[in-house]
Image (cartoon, rainbow, N blue to C red):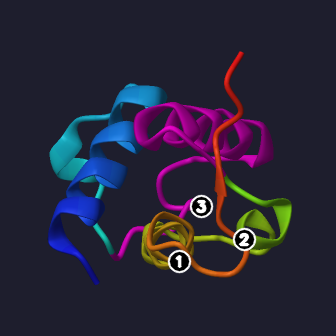
Amino acid sequence: MPDELSQRVVSVIAATQKLPPERVTIDSTFEELGIDSLDGVNILFALENEFNINIPDAKAEGVRSVRQLVESLAQVVGGGPEAAPAKQT
């Protein structure tokens, strides 16, 4: 798991949720961090902006922890078959 990717995801989650960065770890679950489904959507939007990508719904479904999010994002950023560049507006 890319370390820089993990750090960027943790930073985005901490900033989006207004949490101290040290509270968010790779092993944190969304439940432990008080992240509900609406918060999850906001985090996905922030990650799409951070990485200038679109995260397919299939990659976001069922994600319940920081580790799962990083693993899914690694596939998208790494150019997996479902990766899609961000639309230019």
Q: Nearer the viewer, mark 3 or mark 1?
A: 1
The residues tagged by marks 1 and 2 sit, at their Cα atoms, a distance apart of 9 Å
Which one is earlier in the sequence, the residue at label 3 or at label 1?
Answer: 3
Q: Considering only vertical position in the picture, is 3 above or below 9? A: below
> What is the quadrant of residue 66 in the picture?
bottom left
Query: What residue occupies the far front of the structure in this picture?
Result: 88
Q: Which amino acid does label 2 sit on?
A: Lys
Q: How crowded is mark 3: few (under 14 residues within 10 Å), some or many (20 or more)?
A: few
Task: Judge left or right: residue 50 versus residue 54.
Answer: left
Q: Do the residues labelled 1 and 2 touch (CB within 8 Å)?
A: yes
* Disc 1, SS: helix
The residue at which mark 3 appears reads as 31
State whether residue 1 is above or below residue 66.
Answer: below
Q: Which residue is drawn at 73% across and 73% down?
A: 82
Foreground residue, 3 or 21?
3
Quadrant in which the N terminus appears: bottom left
Q: Which of 11 and 80 is in front in this view?
A: 80
Q: Is mark 2 on a helix, strand or loop?
A: helix
At x 83%, y 71%, the residue is 58
Residue topped by disc 2:
59
Amino acid at pointer 3: Glu
- Residue lying furthest top: 89
Query: CA gap, disc 3 to disc 2?
Result: 19 Å
Q: Is residue 27 left or right of residue 85?
A: left
